[in-house]
Image (cartoon, rainbow, N blue to C red):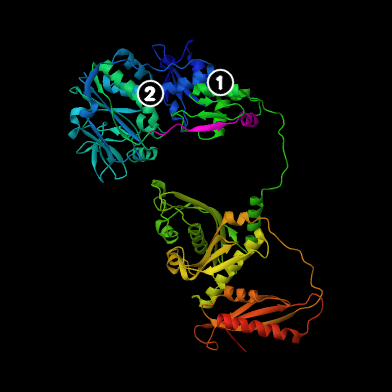
Amino acid sequence: MNISVRWLNHYLSAPACTPEEAELTLMSLGFPSESRTQLSDGDSVLDLEVTSNRGDVLSHLGAAREIAARTGRTLILPTITSSQIDSTPATSLIRVENQNPEVCPLFTARVIRDVRIGPSPEWLRVALESVGQRSISNVVDVTNFITMEFGNPCHVFDLHKIEGGTLVIRYARDKEKLTTLDGKTRTLASDELVVADARVATSLAGVIGGADSEVGASTTDIVLEMATWDPVTVRRASRRHAVRTDASHRFERIVDARTIHTAAERAAAMIAEVSGGRVCAGSVEAGVPLTPGTTLRLRPERCAELLGVGIGADEIVRHLTPLGIRIERRSGEPLQCTIPAWRPDLTREVDLIEEVVRVRGLDTITVSETLPVAVRPPQATETARREIASVLTGLHFFEAVTFSFTTRDTALALLPMGMSLIEINDERRKGEPVCRPSVLAGLLACRRANQHAQVRPDGGVRLYEVAAVFGQAAAGTTAESLQLALLMDVPIKGKLARVEELQVGVNHMRGVIEAVVRAVAGTGQPLEVAPASPNCSGLDPRAYATVTFNTSSLGYYGLIAADVTAGHDLSWPVIGAELNLPVLLGAYPPRTAVVLPPAFPGIERDVSFVLPETVRWDALRAEVARHTQPPLEGATFVGTFRGPQVGKGRKSVTVRLHFRDPHRTLRHEEVDAPVAALVDRVKAALGAEVRA
């Protein structure tokens, strides 16, 4: 941003700020000067480096406000000179239709009649040329002056070239043509915003004007547009058409709608002054209601704590008020700070504290020769993550770090139902333009790379990764969550996987999940696994289950669908799982119970129940637990058998019953009756039979 020191001094009280003082002051406030150039007329120009969050300093008023705050000078706002008024209301000459207020929060139009287009006065031409602007005509030069003065870009149309006397803010029609002020004919896309008349587009909104409505020597009546646009929409159009303008540079950094009216009045008055025109009464506006100013609380004690120096409320007010921050003070309460419209970067209390020290001067903060260090144990979440990594490493898993982007086909296959993809438009990521909706997308690509490198360790490849996933909910809000993803090969012996081998692979993954949960939550914590329909098309519905931990949804695991593995060129099936990492971390530290070892031996009895295929192990376990009473301690799963011996649609589930008396040694005949009673209850409840 080029800043003319002579121009800058118009907004500062005496004494005049020298080029050296202006440069050093702005640099100390966080705006490095790339260069200082001495002009032949005695003026000096500073080339300031302005960060993307400080669009307010892309103007001479903004830079002057910063200098005034640091040096104690008074900021002098430009006066709006009275101009000759045309009694004709602007609403009778121009109409505005804002079809997309979500990307154009405010559009204003003022009409100036009987203008005479010609050369600019000397003061205006010199001011623009001092910051590298070329003088075009008196009317156009005013719009450029206002952009450099207030930071509010504006544009002028020839009123009589606007078809139908209507300006329409709308999205461009796909492949609509627009000839811009630089003489190039551009083909527009349907996601680009334009200002159009009743027939065609007349400018690319926020970026560059159109040639068809350009102000020229024959122009007598003009429409002054001043508006604000969605930064993302402007940035996308600017990059796509490779057009970088002063307007787009500022709109990309947010121009608040509340700053428009003052700048527009100043621009209209100046145009009337330099062109001899008359400003029509009123303005035509379309958009959404202006938002009230944001109010933040600021605790002086918190400011002193963060900065390490004693700063009272009086000093805080003295530093923040010149920046345009209105402060309300109440005894014994935090300061209530109302943020000005030109500072959208101030959103938190710590931002205000940063402003205090920035204006006060970073060099006023003393640096201790030693740093106080307090030794504390690692955070519980970090310890839990290390424990998870240790368990998975012990189970032969390798940690992977993959890209956050994936192909559209892979993303669609792993996209949870009810969500939509988040895509980016970037030439560098043409092949993978989608933010991953599942960490398994990266692990599948990693597994493919291992296969192509002929990596095949005993037991297969096992991978895990902790990473974020992204999606868009139905309401249009972005959803992001942190997941622990697991991927492991199914251990097969031949070229094709048998059903039994797939079952073994699924059971292995369940065992891994149980080991992870035990590591962070301890033994005996409720972990429920339930078959379900997959949450996406990329998982096989024959082998998919949800996992619930302590009534919270933990995630899922299952067999990756054959078309997905084929799409990744994998030669064998793989099992995937995704677990909600915050739920796991929240269960840490593990809870365990210490009990004395039994003093007397126990007795175990195996019972094989023949059950319908639809009866799950959880149901059988729950039924046994419901009737568990001494001397029965509990039951464990032994195995499942399927075959013609038990009949079609049925299975044999073997349960091991554990009996023990804490005070003496049991005799085998003492457990016969409890076993028989339990078997009868399971038969009645689940329709089971006992296999001999």
Q: What stretch is highlighted in magenta?
A: 290-307
Q: Is residue 553 above or below residue 374?
A: below
Q: Earlier in the sequence, mark 1 or mark 2?
A: 2
Residue 421 image point, x, y percent: 41, 54
Whether residue 400 sits left or right of residue 563 in the image: it is right
The residue that disc 1 covers is 318
| Quarter the C terminus occupies | bottom right
Question: Which quadrant: the N terminus?
Answer: top left
Query: Is residue 237 found left or right of 390 in the rendered image?
Result: left
Residue 148: numbered disc: 2
Query: Whole-Å distance between the Cαs marked 1 and 2?
Result: 28 Å
Taking the image as shown, residue 163 lies to the left or right of residue 550, namely left
Q: Position of residue 588 (x, y in %)?
A: 65, 55
Q: Position of residue 522 (x, y in %)?
A: 68, 61
Q: Is the C-beta separation of discs 1 and 2 under 8 Å?
A: no
Give x and y (percent) for residue 14.
48, 10
Say whether residue 580 is visible: yes
Is residue 241 placed above or below 5 in the rendered structure? below
297 in magenta: yes
The amino acid sitting under disc 1 is Arg
505 to 225, vertically: above or below: below
Residue under the point 67% across and 27% down: 367
Q: Looking at numbered disc 2 in the image, what kind of residue is underneath it?
A: Met
Q: Can residue 400 be seen in this view?
A: no
Which residue is nearer to you in this view: 504 or 682?
A: 682
